Structures are given as structure tokens and as C-alpha cells.
Amino acid sequence: MSLKKFFIFLMFSLISISFLFAQAGRGTARIGGTVKDEEGKPVIGAKVVLEHQEEKGALRDAKTDKKGKWSIIGLGTGIWKLTVTAEGYEPYEQVIFVSQLERNPSIDVILKKIKIAEPEYEEGVEFLEEGNKLFNEGKFVEAISAYKKFLEKNPSAYQVHFNIGNCYKEKGDFEKAIEEYNIVLSETKAKGVDLKGEKLYAKTLAAMGEVLVKKGDYQSAQTYFQQSLDLNPQDENLAYNVGEIYFSSGKIEEAIQFFNLAIQIKPQWSEPYLKLGYVYLNKNDLEKAKEMFKKYLELAPDAPNAEEIKKVIQSLEKK
């Protein structure tokens, strides 16, 4: 192939990639999978939501059938945030890449059951269960009401303010979310215990950081994230989750920083490399994206999405 033809082909390939990413949310791609519990049983009626990360508001959703299966069609090429919720289970989130050109691999999700009240908080536990159910259904106002009824029965259960804060965060009432999170932080400090190892305290700091990111106060958010990580310096999941928060908020450089931190903590963990591949793809740094995707495959050659990632790499290195 002549040099001239090569550059023409390369230009066409890059234009094609840009065009595909421009089809924000709309297209012909199909994706599906399963939702099961930790025992491998299908979770019936779980809600699956896909949100395009380049065109906010581009949403697709589905519910699982009696076998726990789901599928969504009409998707455009690009990066989507997958959220799965079901009554009695912790919400699940994952960032995925959807292709219109190739068959997308099955997304198989395992949901963890919510651990509800501690033994000393047995009275009014039905309100806590109802709050969790309503939260998973996206009924945040009703969930807040249920959680507050639980608190009336168990006023010392300050941990539930974390749940209430999450409700306010999801409904966009950030000031009230901060108020609730501050209750958790102050009550935990009042216990006079070593904060290292207090997972809820660290999670609350991270949640405060997430709210501040949503408010656009990135400097303060960084402070809270760092405090959370200082309490759990070897928690690769925390660093990874902070990277996810920044990535979904469009703060690419910060996302890179925290995904790299997750790698420093656990170098053989494949997931941060995958997310860095998507980040660099979003940044249009195709060489770096290719490098990250290759490292992901090196660490997870048998991953369910391995074939998909191989095809992404192939599309990036066509000559």
C-alpha cells in the first residue's frame, strides 16, 4: 500500500470512529445479559438502565424475565453506564462499551443482597426494608419517609442518615445530602473510635466527594476523596469508584489519576486498565487506549468481554 493510500485509509478510519461515537445514544446495536443472585438464582424483575456517557439524558431500560435475562436494542456506539437495581439487593453499576459493528458480549451481573438492620435495631425493621425497596425503585421521596419512620423507632441508628443522604443525592438535593452525611461523620467521631477501619465513615467521605463533584466543587471533592483514601490507603475499590465518579462527570484527568491509583494498590487487577482504555478512547488518545486495552487482556484473557475488547483494539490499529 502506498504512503498516500495509507494516510487516506487512516483518515477514513478515524472519521468512521468519530462518526460512530457521534451517534450519541441512537443506533442499531443490541446488548443483553443476565441478572442473578450470589447463589446463581435468577433475579426476576430487576431493572436494567443504560445511560449514554456522552449524551446525558439518552436512556434505555429493560426488566429481567423469569430466567433473569434482559436485552436492549437500538443503541448507538459508545460508552454507556449500566445500572441494575432490584428489591432487596444492592444497586450494581458498570461502565461498558457498545459496538454497532460487532456482536456485543453478554453482560452477566451478580447482585448482592442488602444487609439490613443490626440485631439491636429490630423494631421498625419493616420501614428500613421498605426504604431500601423504594430507593431501588427510584422513589427517593418515599424512601426518605420510610427511613425517617425507622429512625423514629431507632433514634440511635445514625447510620441510616447515610441512606437518607443517598436519596437526597439521587434526587439532586445536594445541600440536604451534605447535611445527612455530616450527621454520619459527626456521630461516628463522637464514638471516639479509631476511624481507620470504619468503612461507613470512609464511604460517607467518598459520598460527600461525589456530591461536591455534582455541584462542580472539584477542589473540595478532591479533599474528601483523599480523606477517604487516607483511611483506607489499600482499598483499590475505593480508588476505582472515585475514578468512576469523575469519569461519569466528564472529569477525564481526575478519572485517570484515580484509576491509576487503583492500579498502584493492586497492579494485577484488570478492571482499572479497562476503564482507562475507555477514558483514553473518550479523550481521543487512541494509542494510549490501545495500550490499556491490551494490558487488560493480558491480565484477563478469559474475561467475558475479551472478544469485544479484541475487536476494539483491531479497529484502532487497522492499517
Image (tube, rainbow, N blue to C red):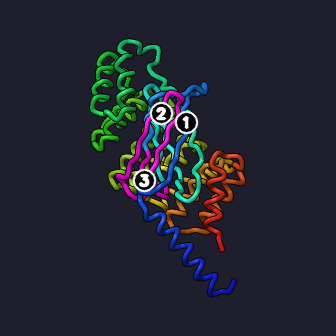
| Residue found at x 54% / y 48% | 239
Residue density around tag 1, few if under 14, some if 14–19, many if 20 or more, within 10 Å: many
Q: Nearer the viewer, residue 75 or 288?
A: 75
Q: Amino acid at mark 1?
A: Thr
| Residue found at x 28% / y 39% | 176
The reply to whether dot 1 and dot 2 touch (C-beta < 8 Å) is yes
Q: Residue furthest top?
A: 123
Element carrying mark 3 = strand
Q: Nearer the viewer, residue 280 or 6?
A: 6
- 3D distance between C-alphas at marks 3 and 1: 20 Å
Q: Is residue 145 left or right of residue 204?
A: left
Residue 229 seen from this side: no
Q: Is residue 62 magenta?
A: yes
Element carrying mark 2 = loop
Residue range in magenta is 50-79
Residue hosting label 1: 34
Residue hosting label 2: 64
| Residue found at x 40% / y 51% | 221
- 3D distance between C-alphas at marks 1 and 2: 7 Å
Q: Amino acid at mark 3?
A: His
Element carrying mark 1 = strand
Residue 74 seen from this side: yes
Q: Is residue 194 above or below residue 22?
A: above
Residue 277 % position (x, y): 58, 59
Mark toward the viewer: 3 or 1: 1
- 3D distance between C-alphas at marks 2 and 3: 20 Å
| Residue 85 numbered tag | none
